[in-house]
Image (tube, rainbow, N blue to C red):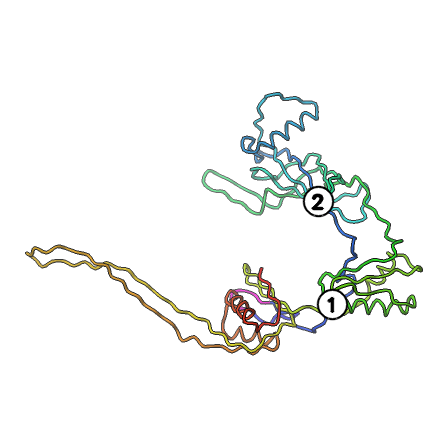
Amino acid sequence: MRLLSLMGFGLALVLAGPGHATSRIKDVTVVQGIRDNQLVGYGLVIGLAGTGDSLRTSAFTEVSMRSMLQRMGIGLGDTAIQSKNVAAVVVTATLPPFVTQGTRIDATVSSLGDATSLGGGTLVMTPLVAANGEAFAVAQGSVTINGFKAQGKATTVTQGIPTTGRVPNGAIVERDHEADINSIPEFTLQLQNPDFSTAEEIADQINLYAQRRFGAAIAEVKDFRSVRVKRPDSIIASRLMAELGQLKVEVDAPARIVVDERSGTIVMGENVRISPVAISIGSLTVKITEDVIVSQPLPRSDGKTVTAPSTEIQIAQPDDPVAILRGPTLEKLVQGLNRMGLKPPEITSILQSIKSAGALQAELVVQ
């Protein structure tokens, strides 16, 4: 990676180097079906130092508190609850593949009501369910946050997000999430960056290896994002995945420009090309000044003092040159934009205009 230029107040990173990078198959693909699962739950964080939900505005928090206490054998009846030490939260977690009962995973808690901070609180036992409604884990434990909020009568200081926290290793898996993959007859490798050239390269490298190892080709391209692999009878699937994952392939990247307007970062791929194009940036400035003119009558006359509006319009248009960009390569394109003394917002606008004119031979992604 080479840092070619600093554009104005923003940073433009250019990844310059070979057009094709060599990577392991395991780094550019994933096995279809082997994935994480999302879990979610609703619970209460207790023990807050007066930073919890206001029960008058967060009615669901009071209902949850009453329900929890009733399950514990404590009936409140119509007694009003005035506590500010409890907050209703949504608990989320990611269930990795092939986990077994008793495995601990991290959980994230996010406030639902008007609590100001979850710092120092404890998450009460909360079931975590999957998309099918079945509970796979239970979360409980102390909440840690990265932000804080300090409030006085006239000033409030907030750093980070104090209403979101984590419970490290706070969720325990209660159901096995195992699968027997060793006996499957075939599996599919999905490309993380779909591309026909890369898919064909992966299939070719696998077949070259399989010819030496098993005496037959075992891979074929399904489409630009997936490669099907048939498992020989002499090897189990997990072993085959491990061996194929170490094979190296040349990954082809599409021509793409990514622009982050918030930070002014511009990232361009090595394969970006631009046709010769002329660019002129207009800087017409129109300044309008409003004033009032007062007219006084002559002494000892019957005249009256009157006022009249006065408008002054100034138009300035510097002699802006018309720049011609001849950028058959990425480096020349960046150098041409730099010579014009442009800032990242202006470069973004120019790239969008060049794309609309059909002269930019790349995908433009603006974030």
> Is 97 rendered above or below residue 18?
above
The amino acid beneath tag 2 is Ala
Residue 323 falls left or right of residue 230: left
Q: Quadrant of the N terminus?
A: bottom right
Q: Which residue in the protein does label 1 denote?
A: 196
Few, some or many C-alpha atoms within 10 Å of disc 2 (few <14, some 14-19, many ≥20)?
many
Report helix, strand or loop for mark 1. Answer: helix
Toward which corner of the image does residue 326 lie, by quadrant? Answer: bottom right
Label at residue 93: 2
Span highlighted in magenta in the image = 7-12
Counting residues from the N terminus, which is met first, the one under dot 1 or under dot 2?
A: 2
Which marked residue is nearer to the observer: mark 1 or mark 2? Answer: 1
The residues tagged by marks 1 and 2 sit, at their Cα atoms, a distance apart of 35 Å
Residue 75 position, x and y percent, is 66, 21
Question: Which SS type dominates the magenta stretch?
Answer: strand
Residue 105 position, x and y percent, is 74, 44
- Residues 171 and 259: in front is 259
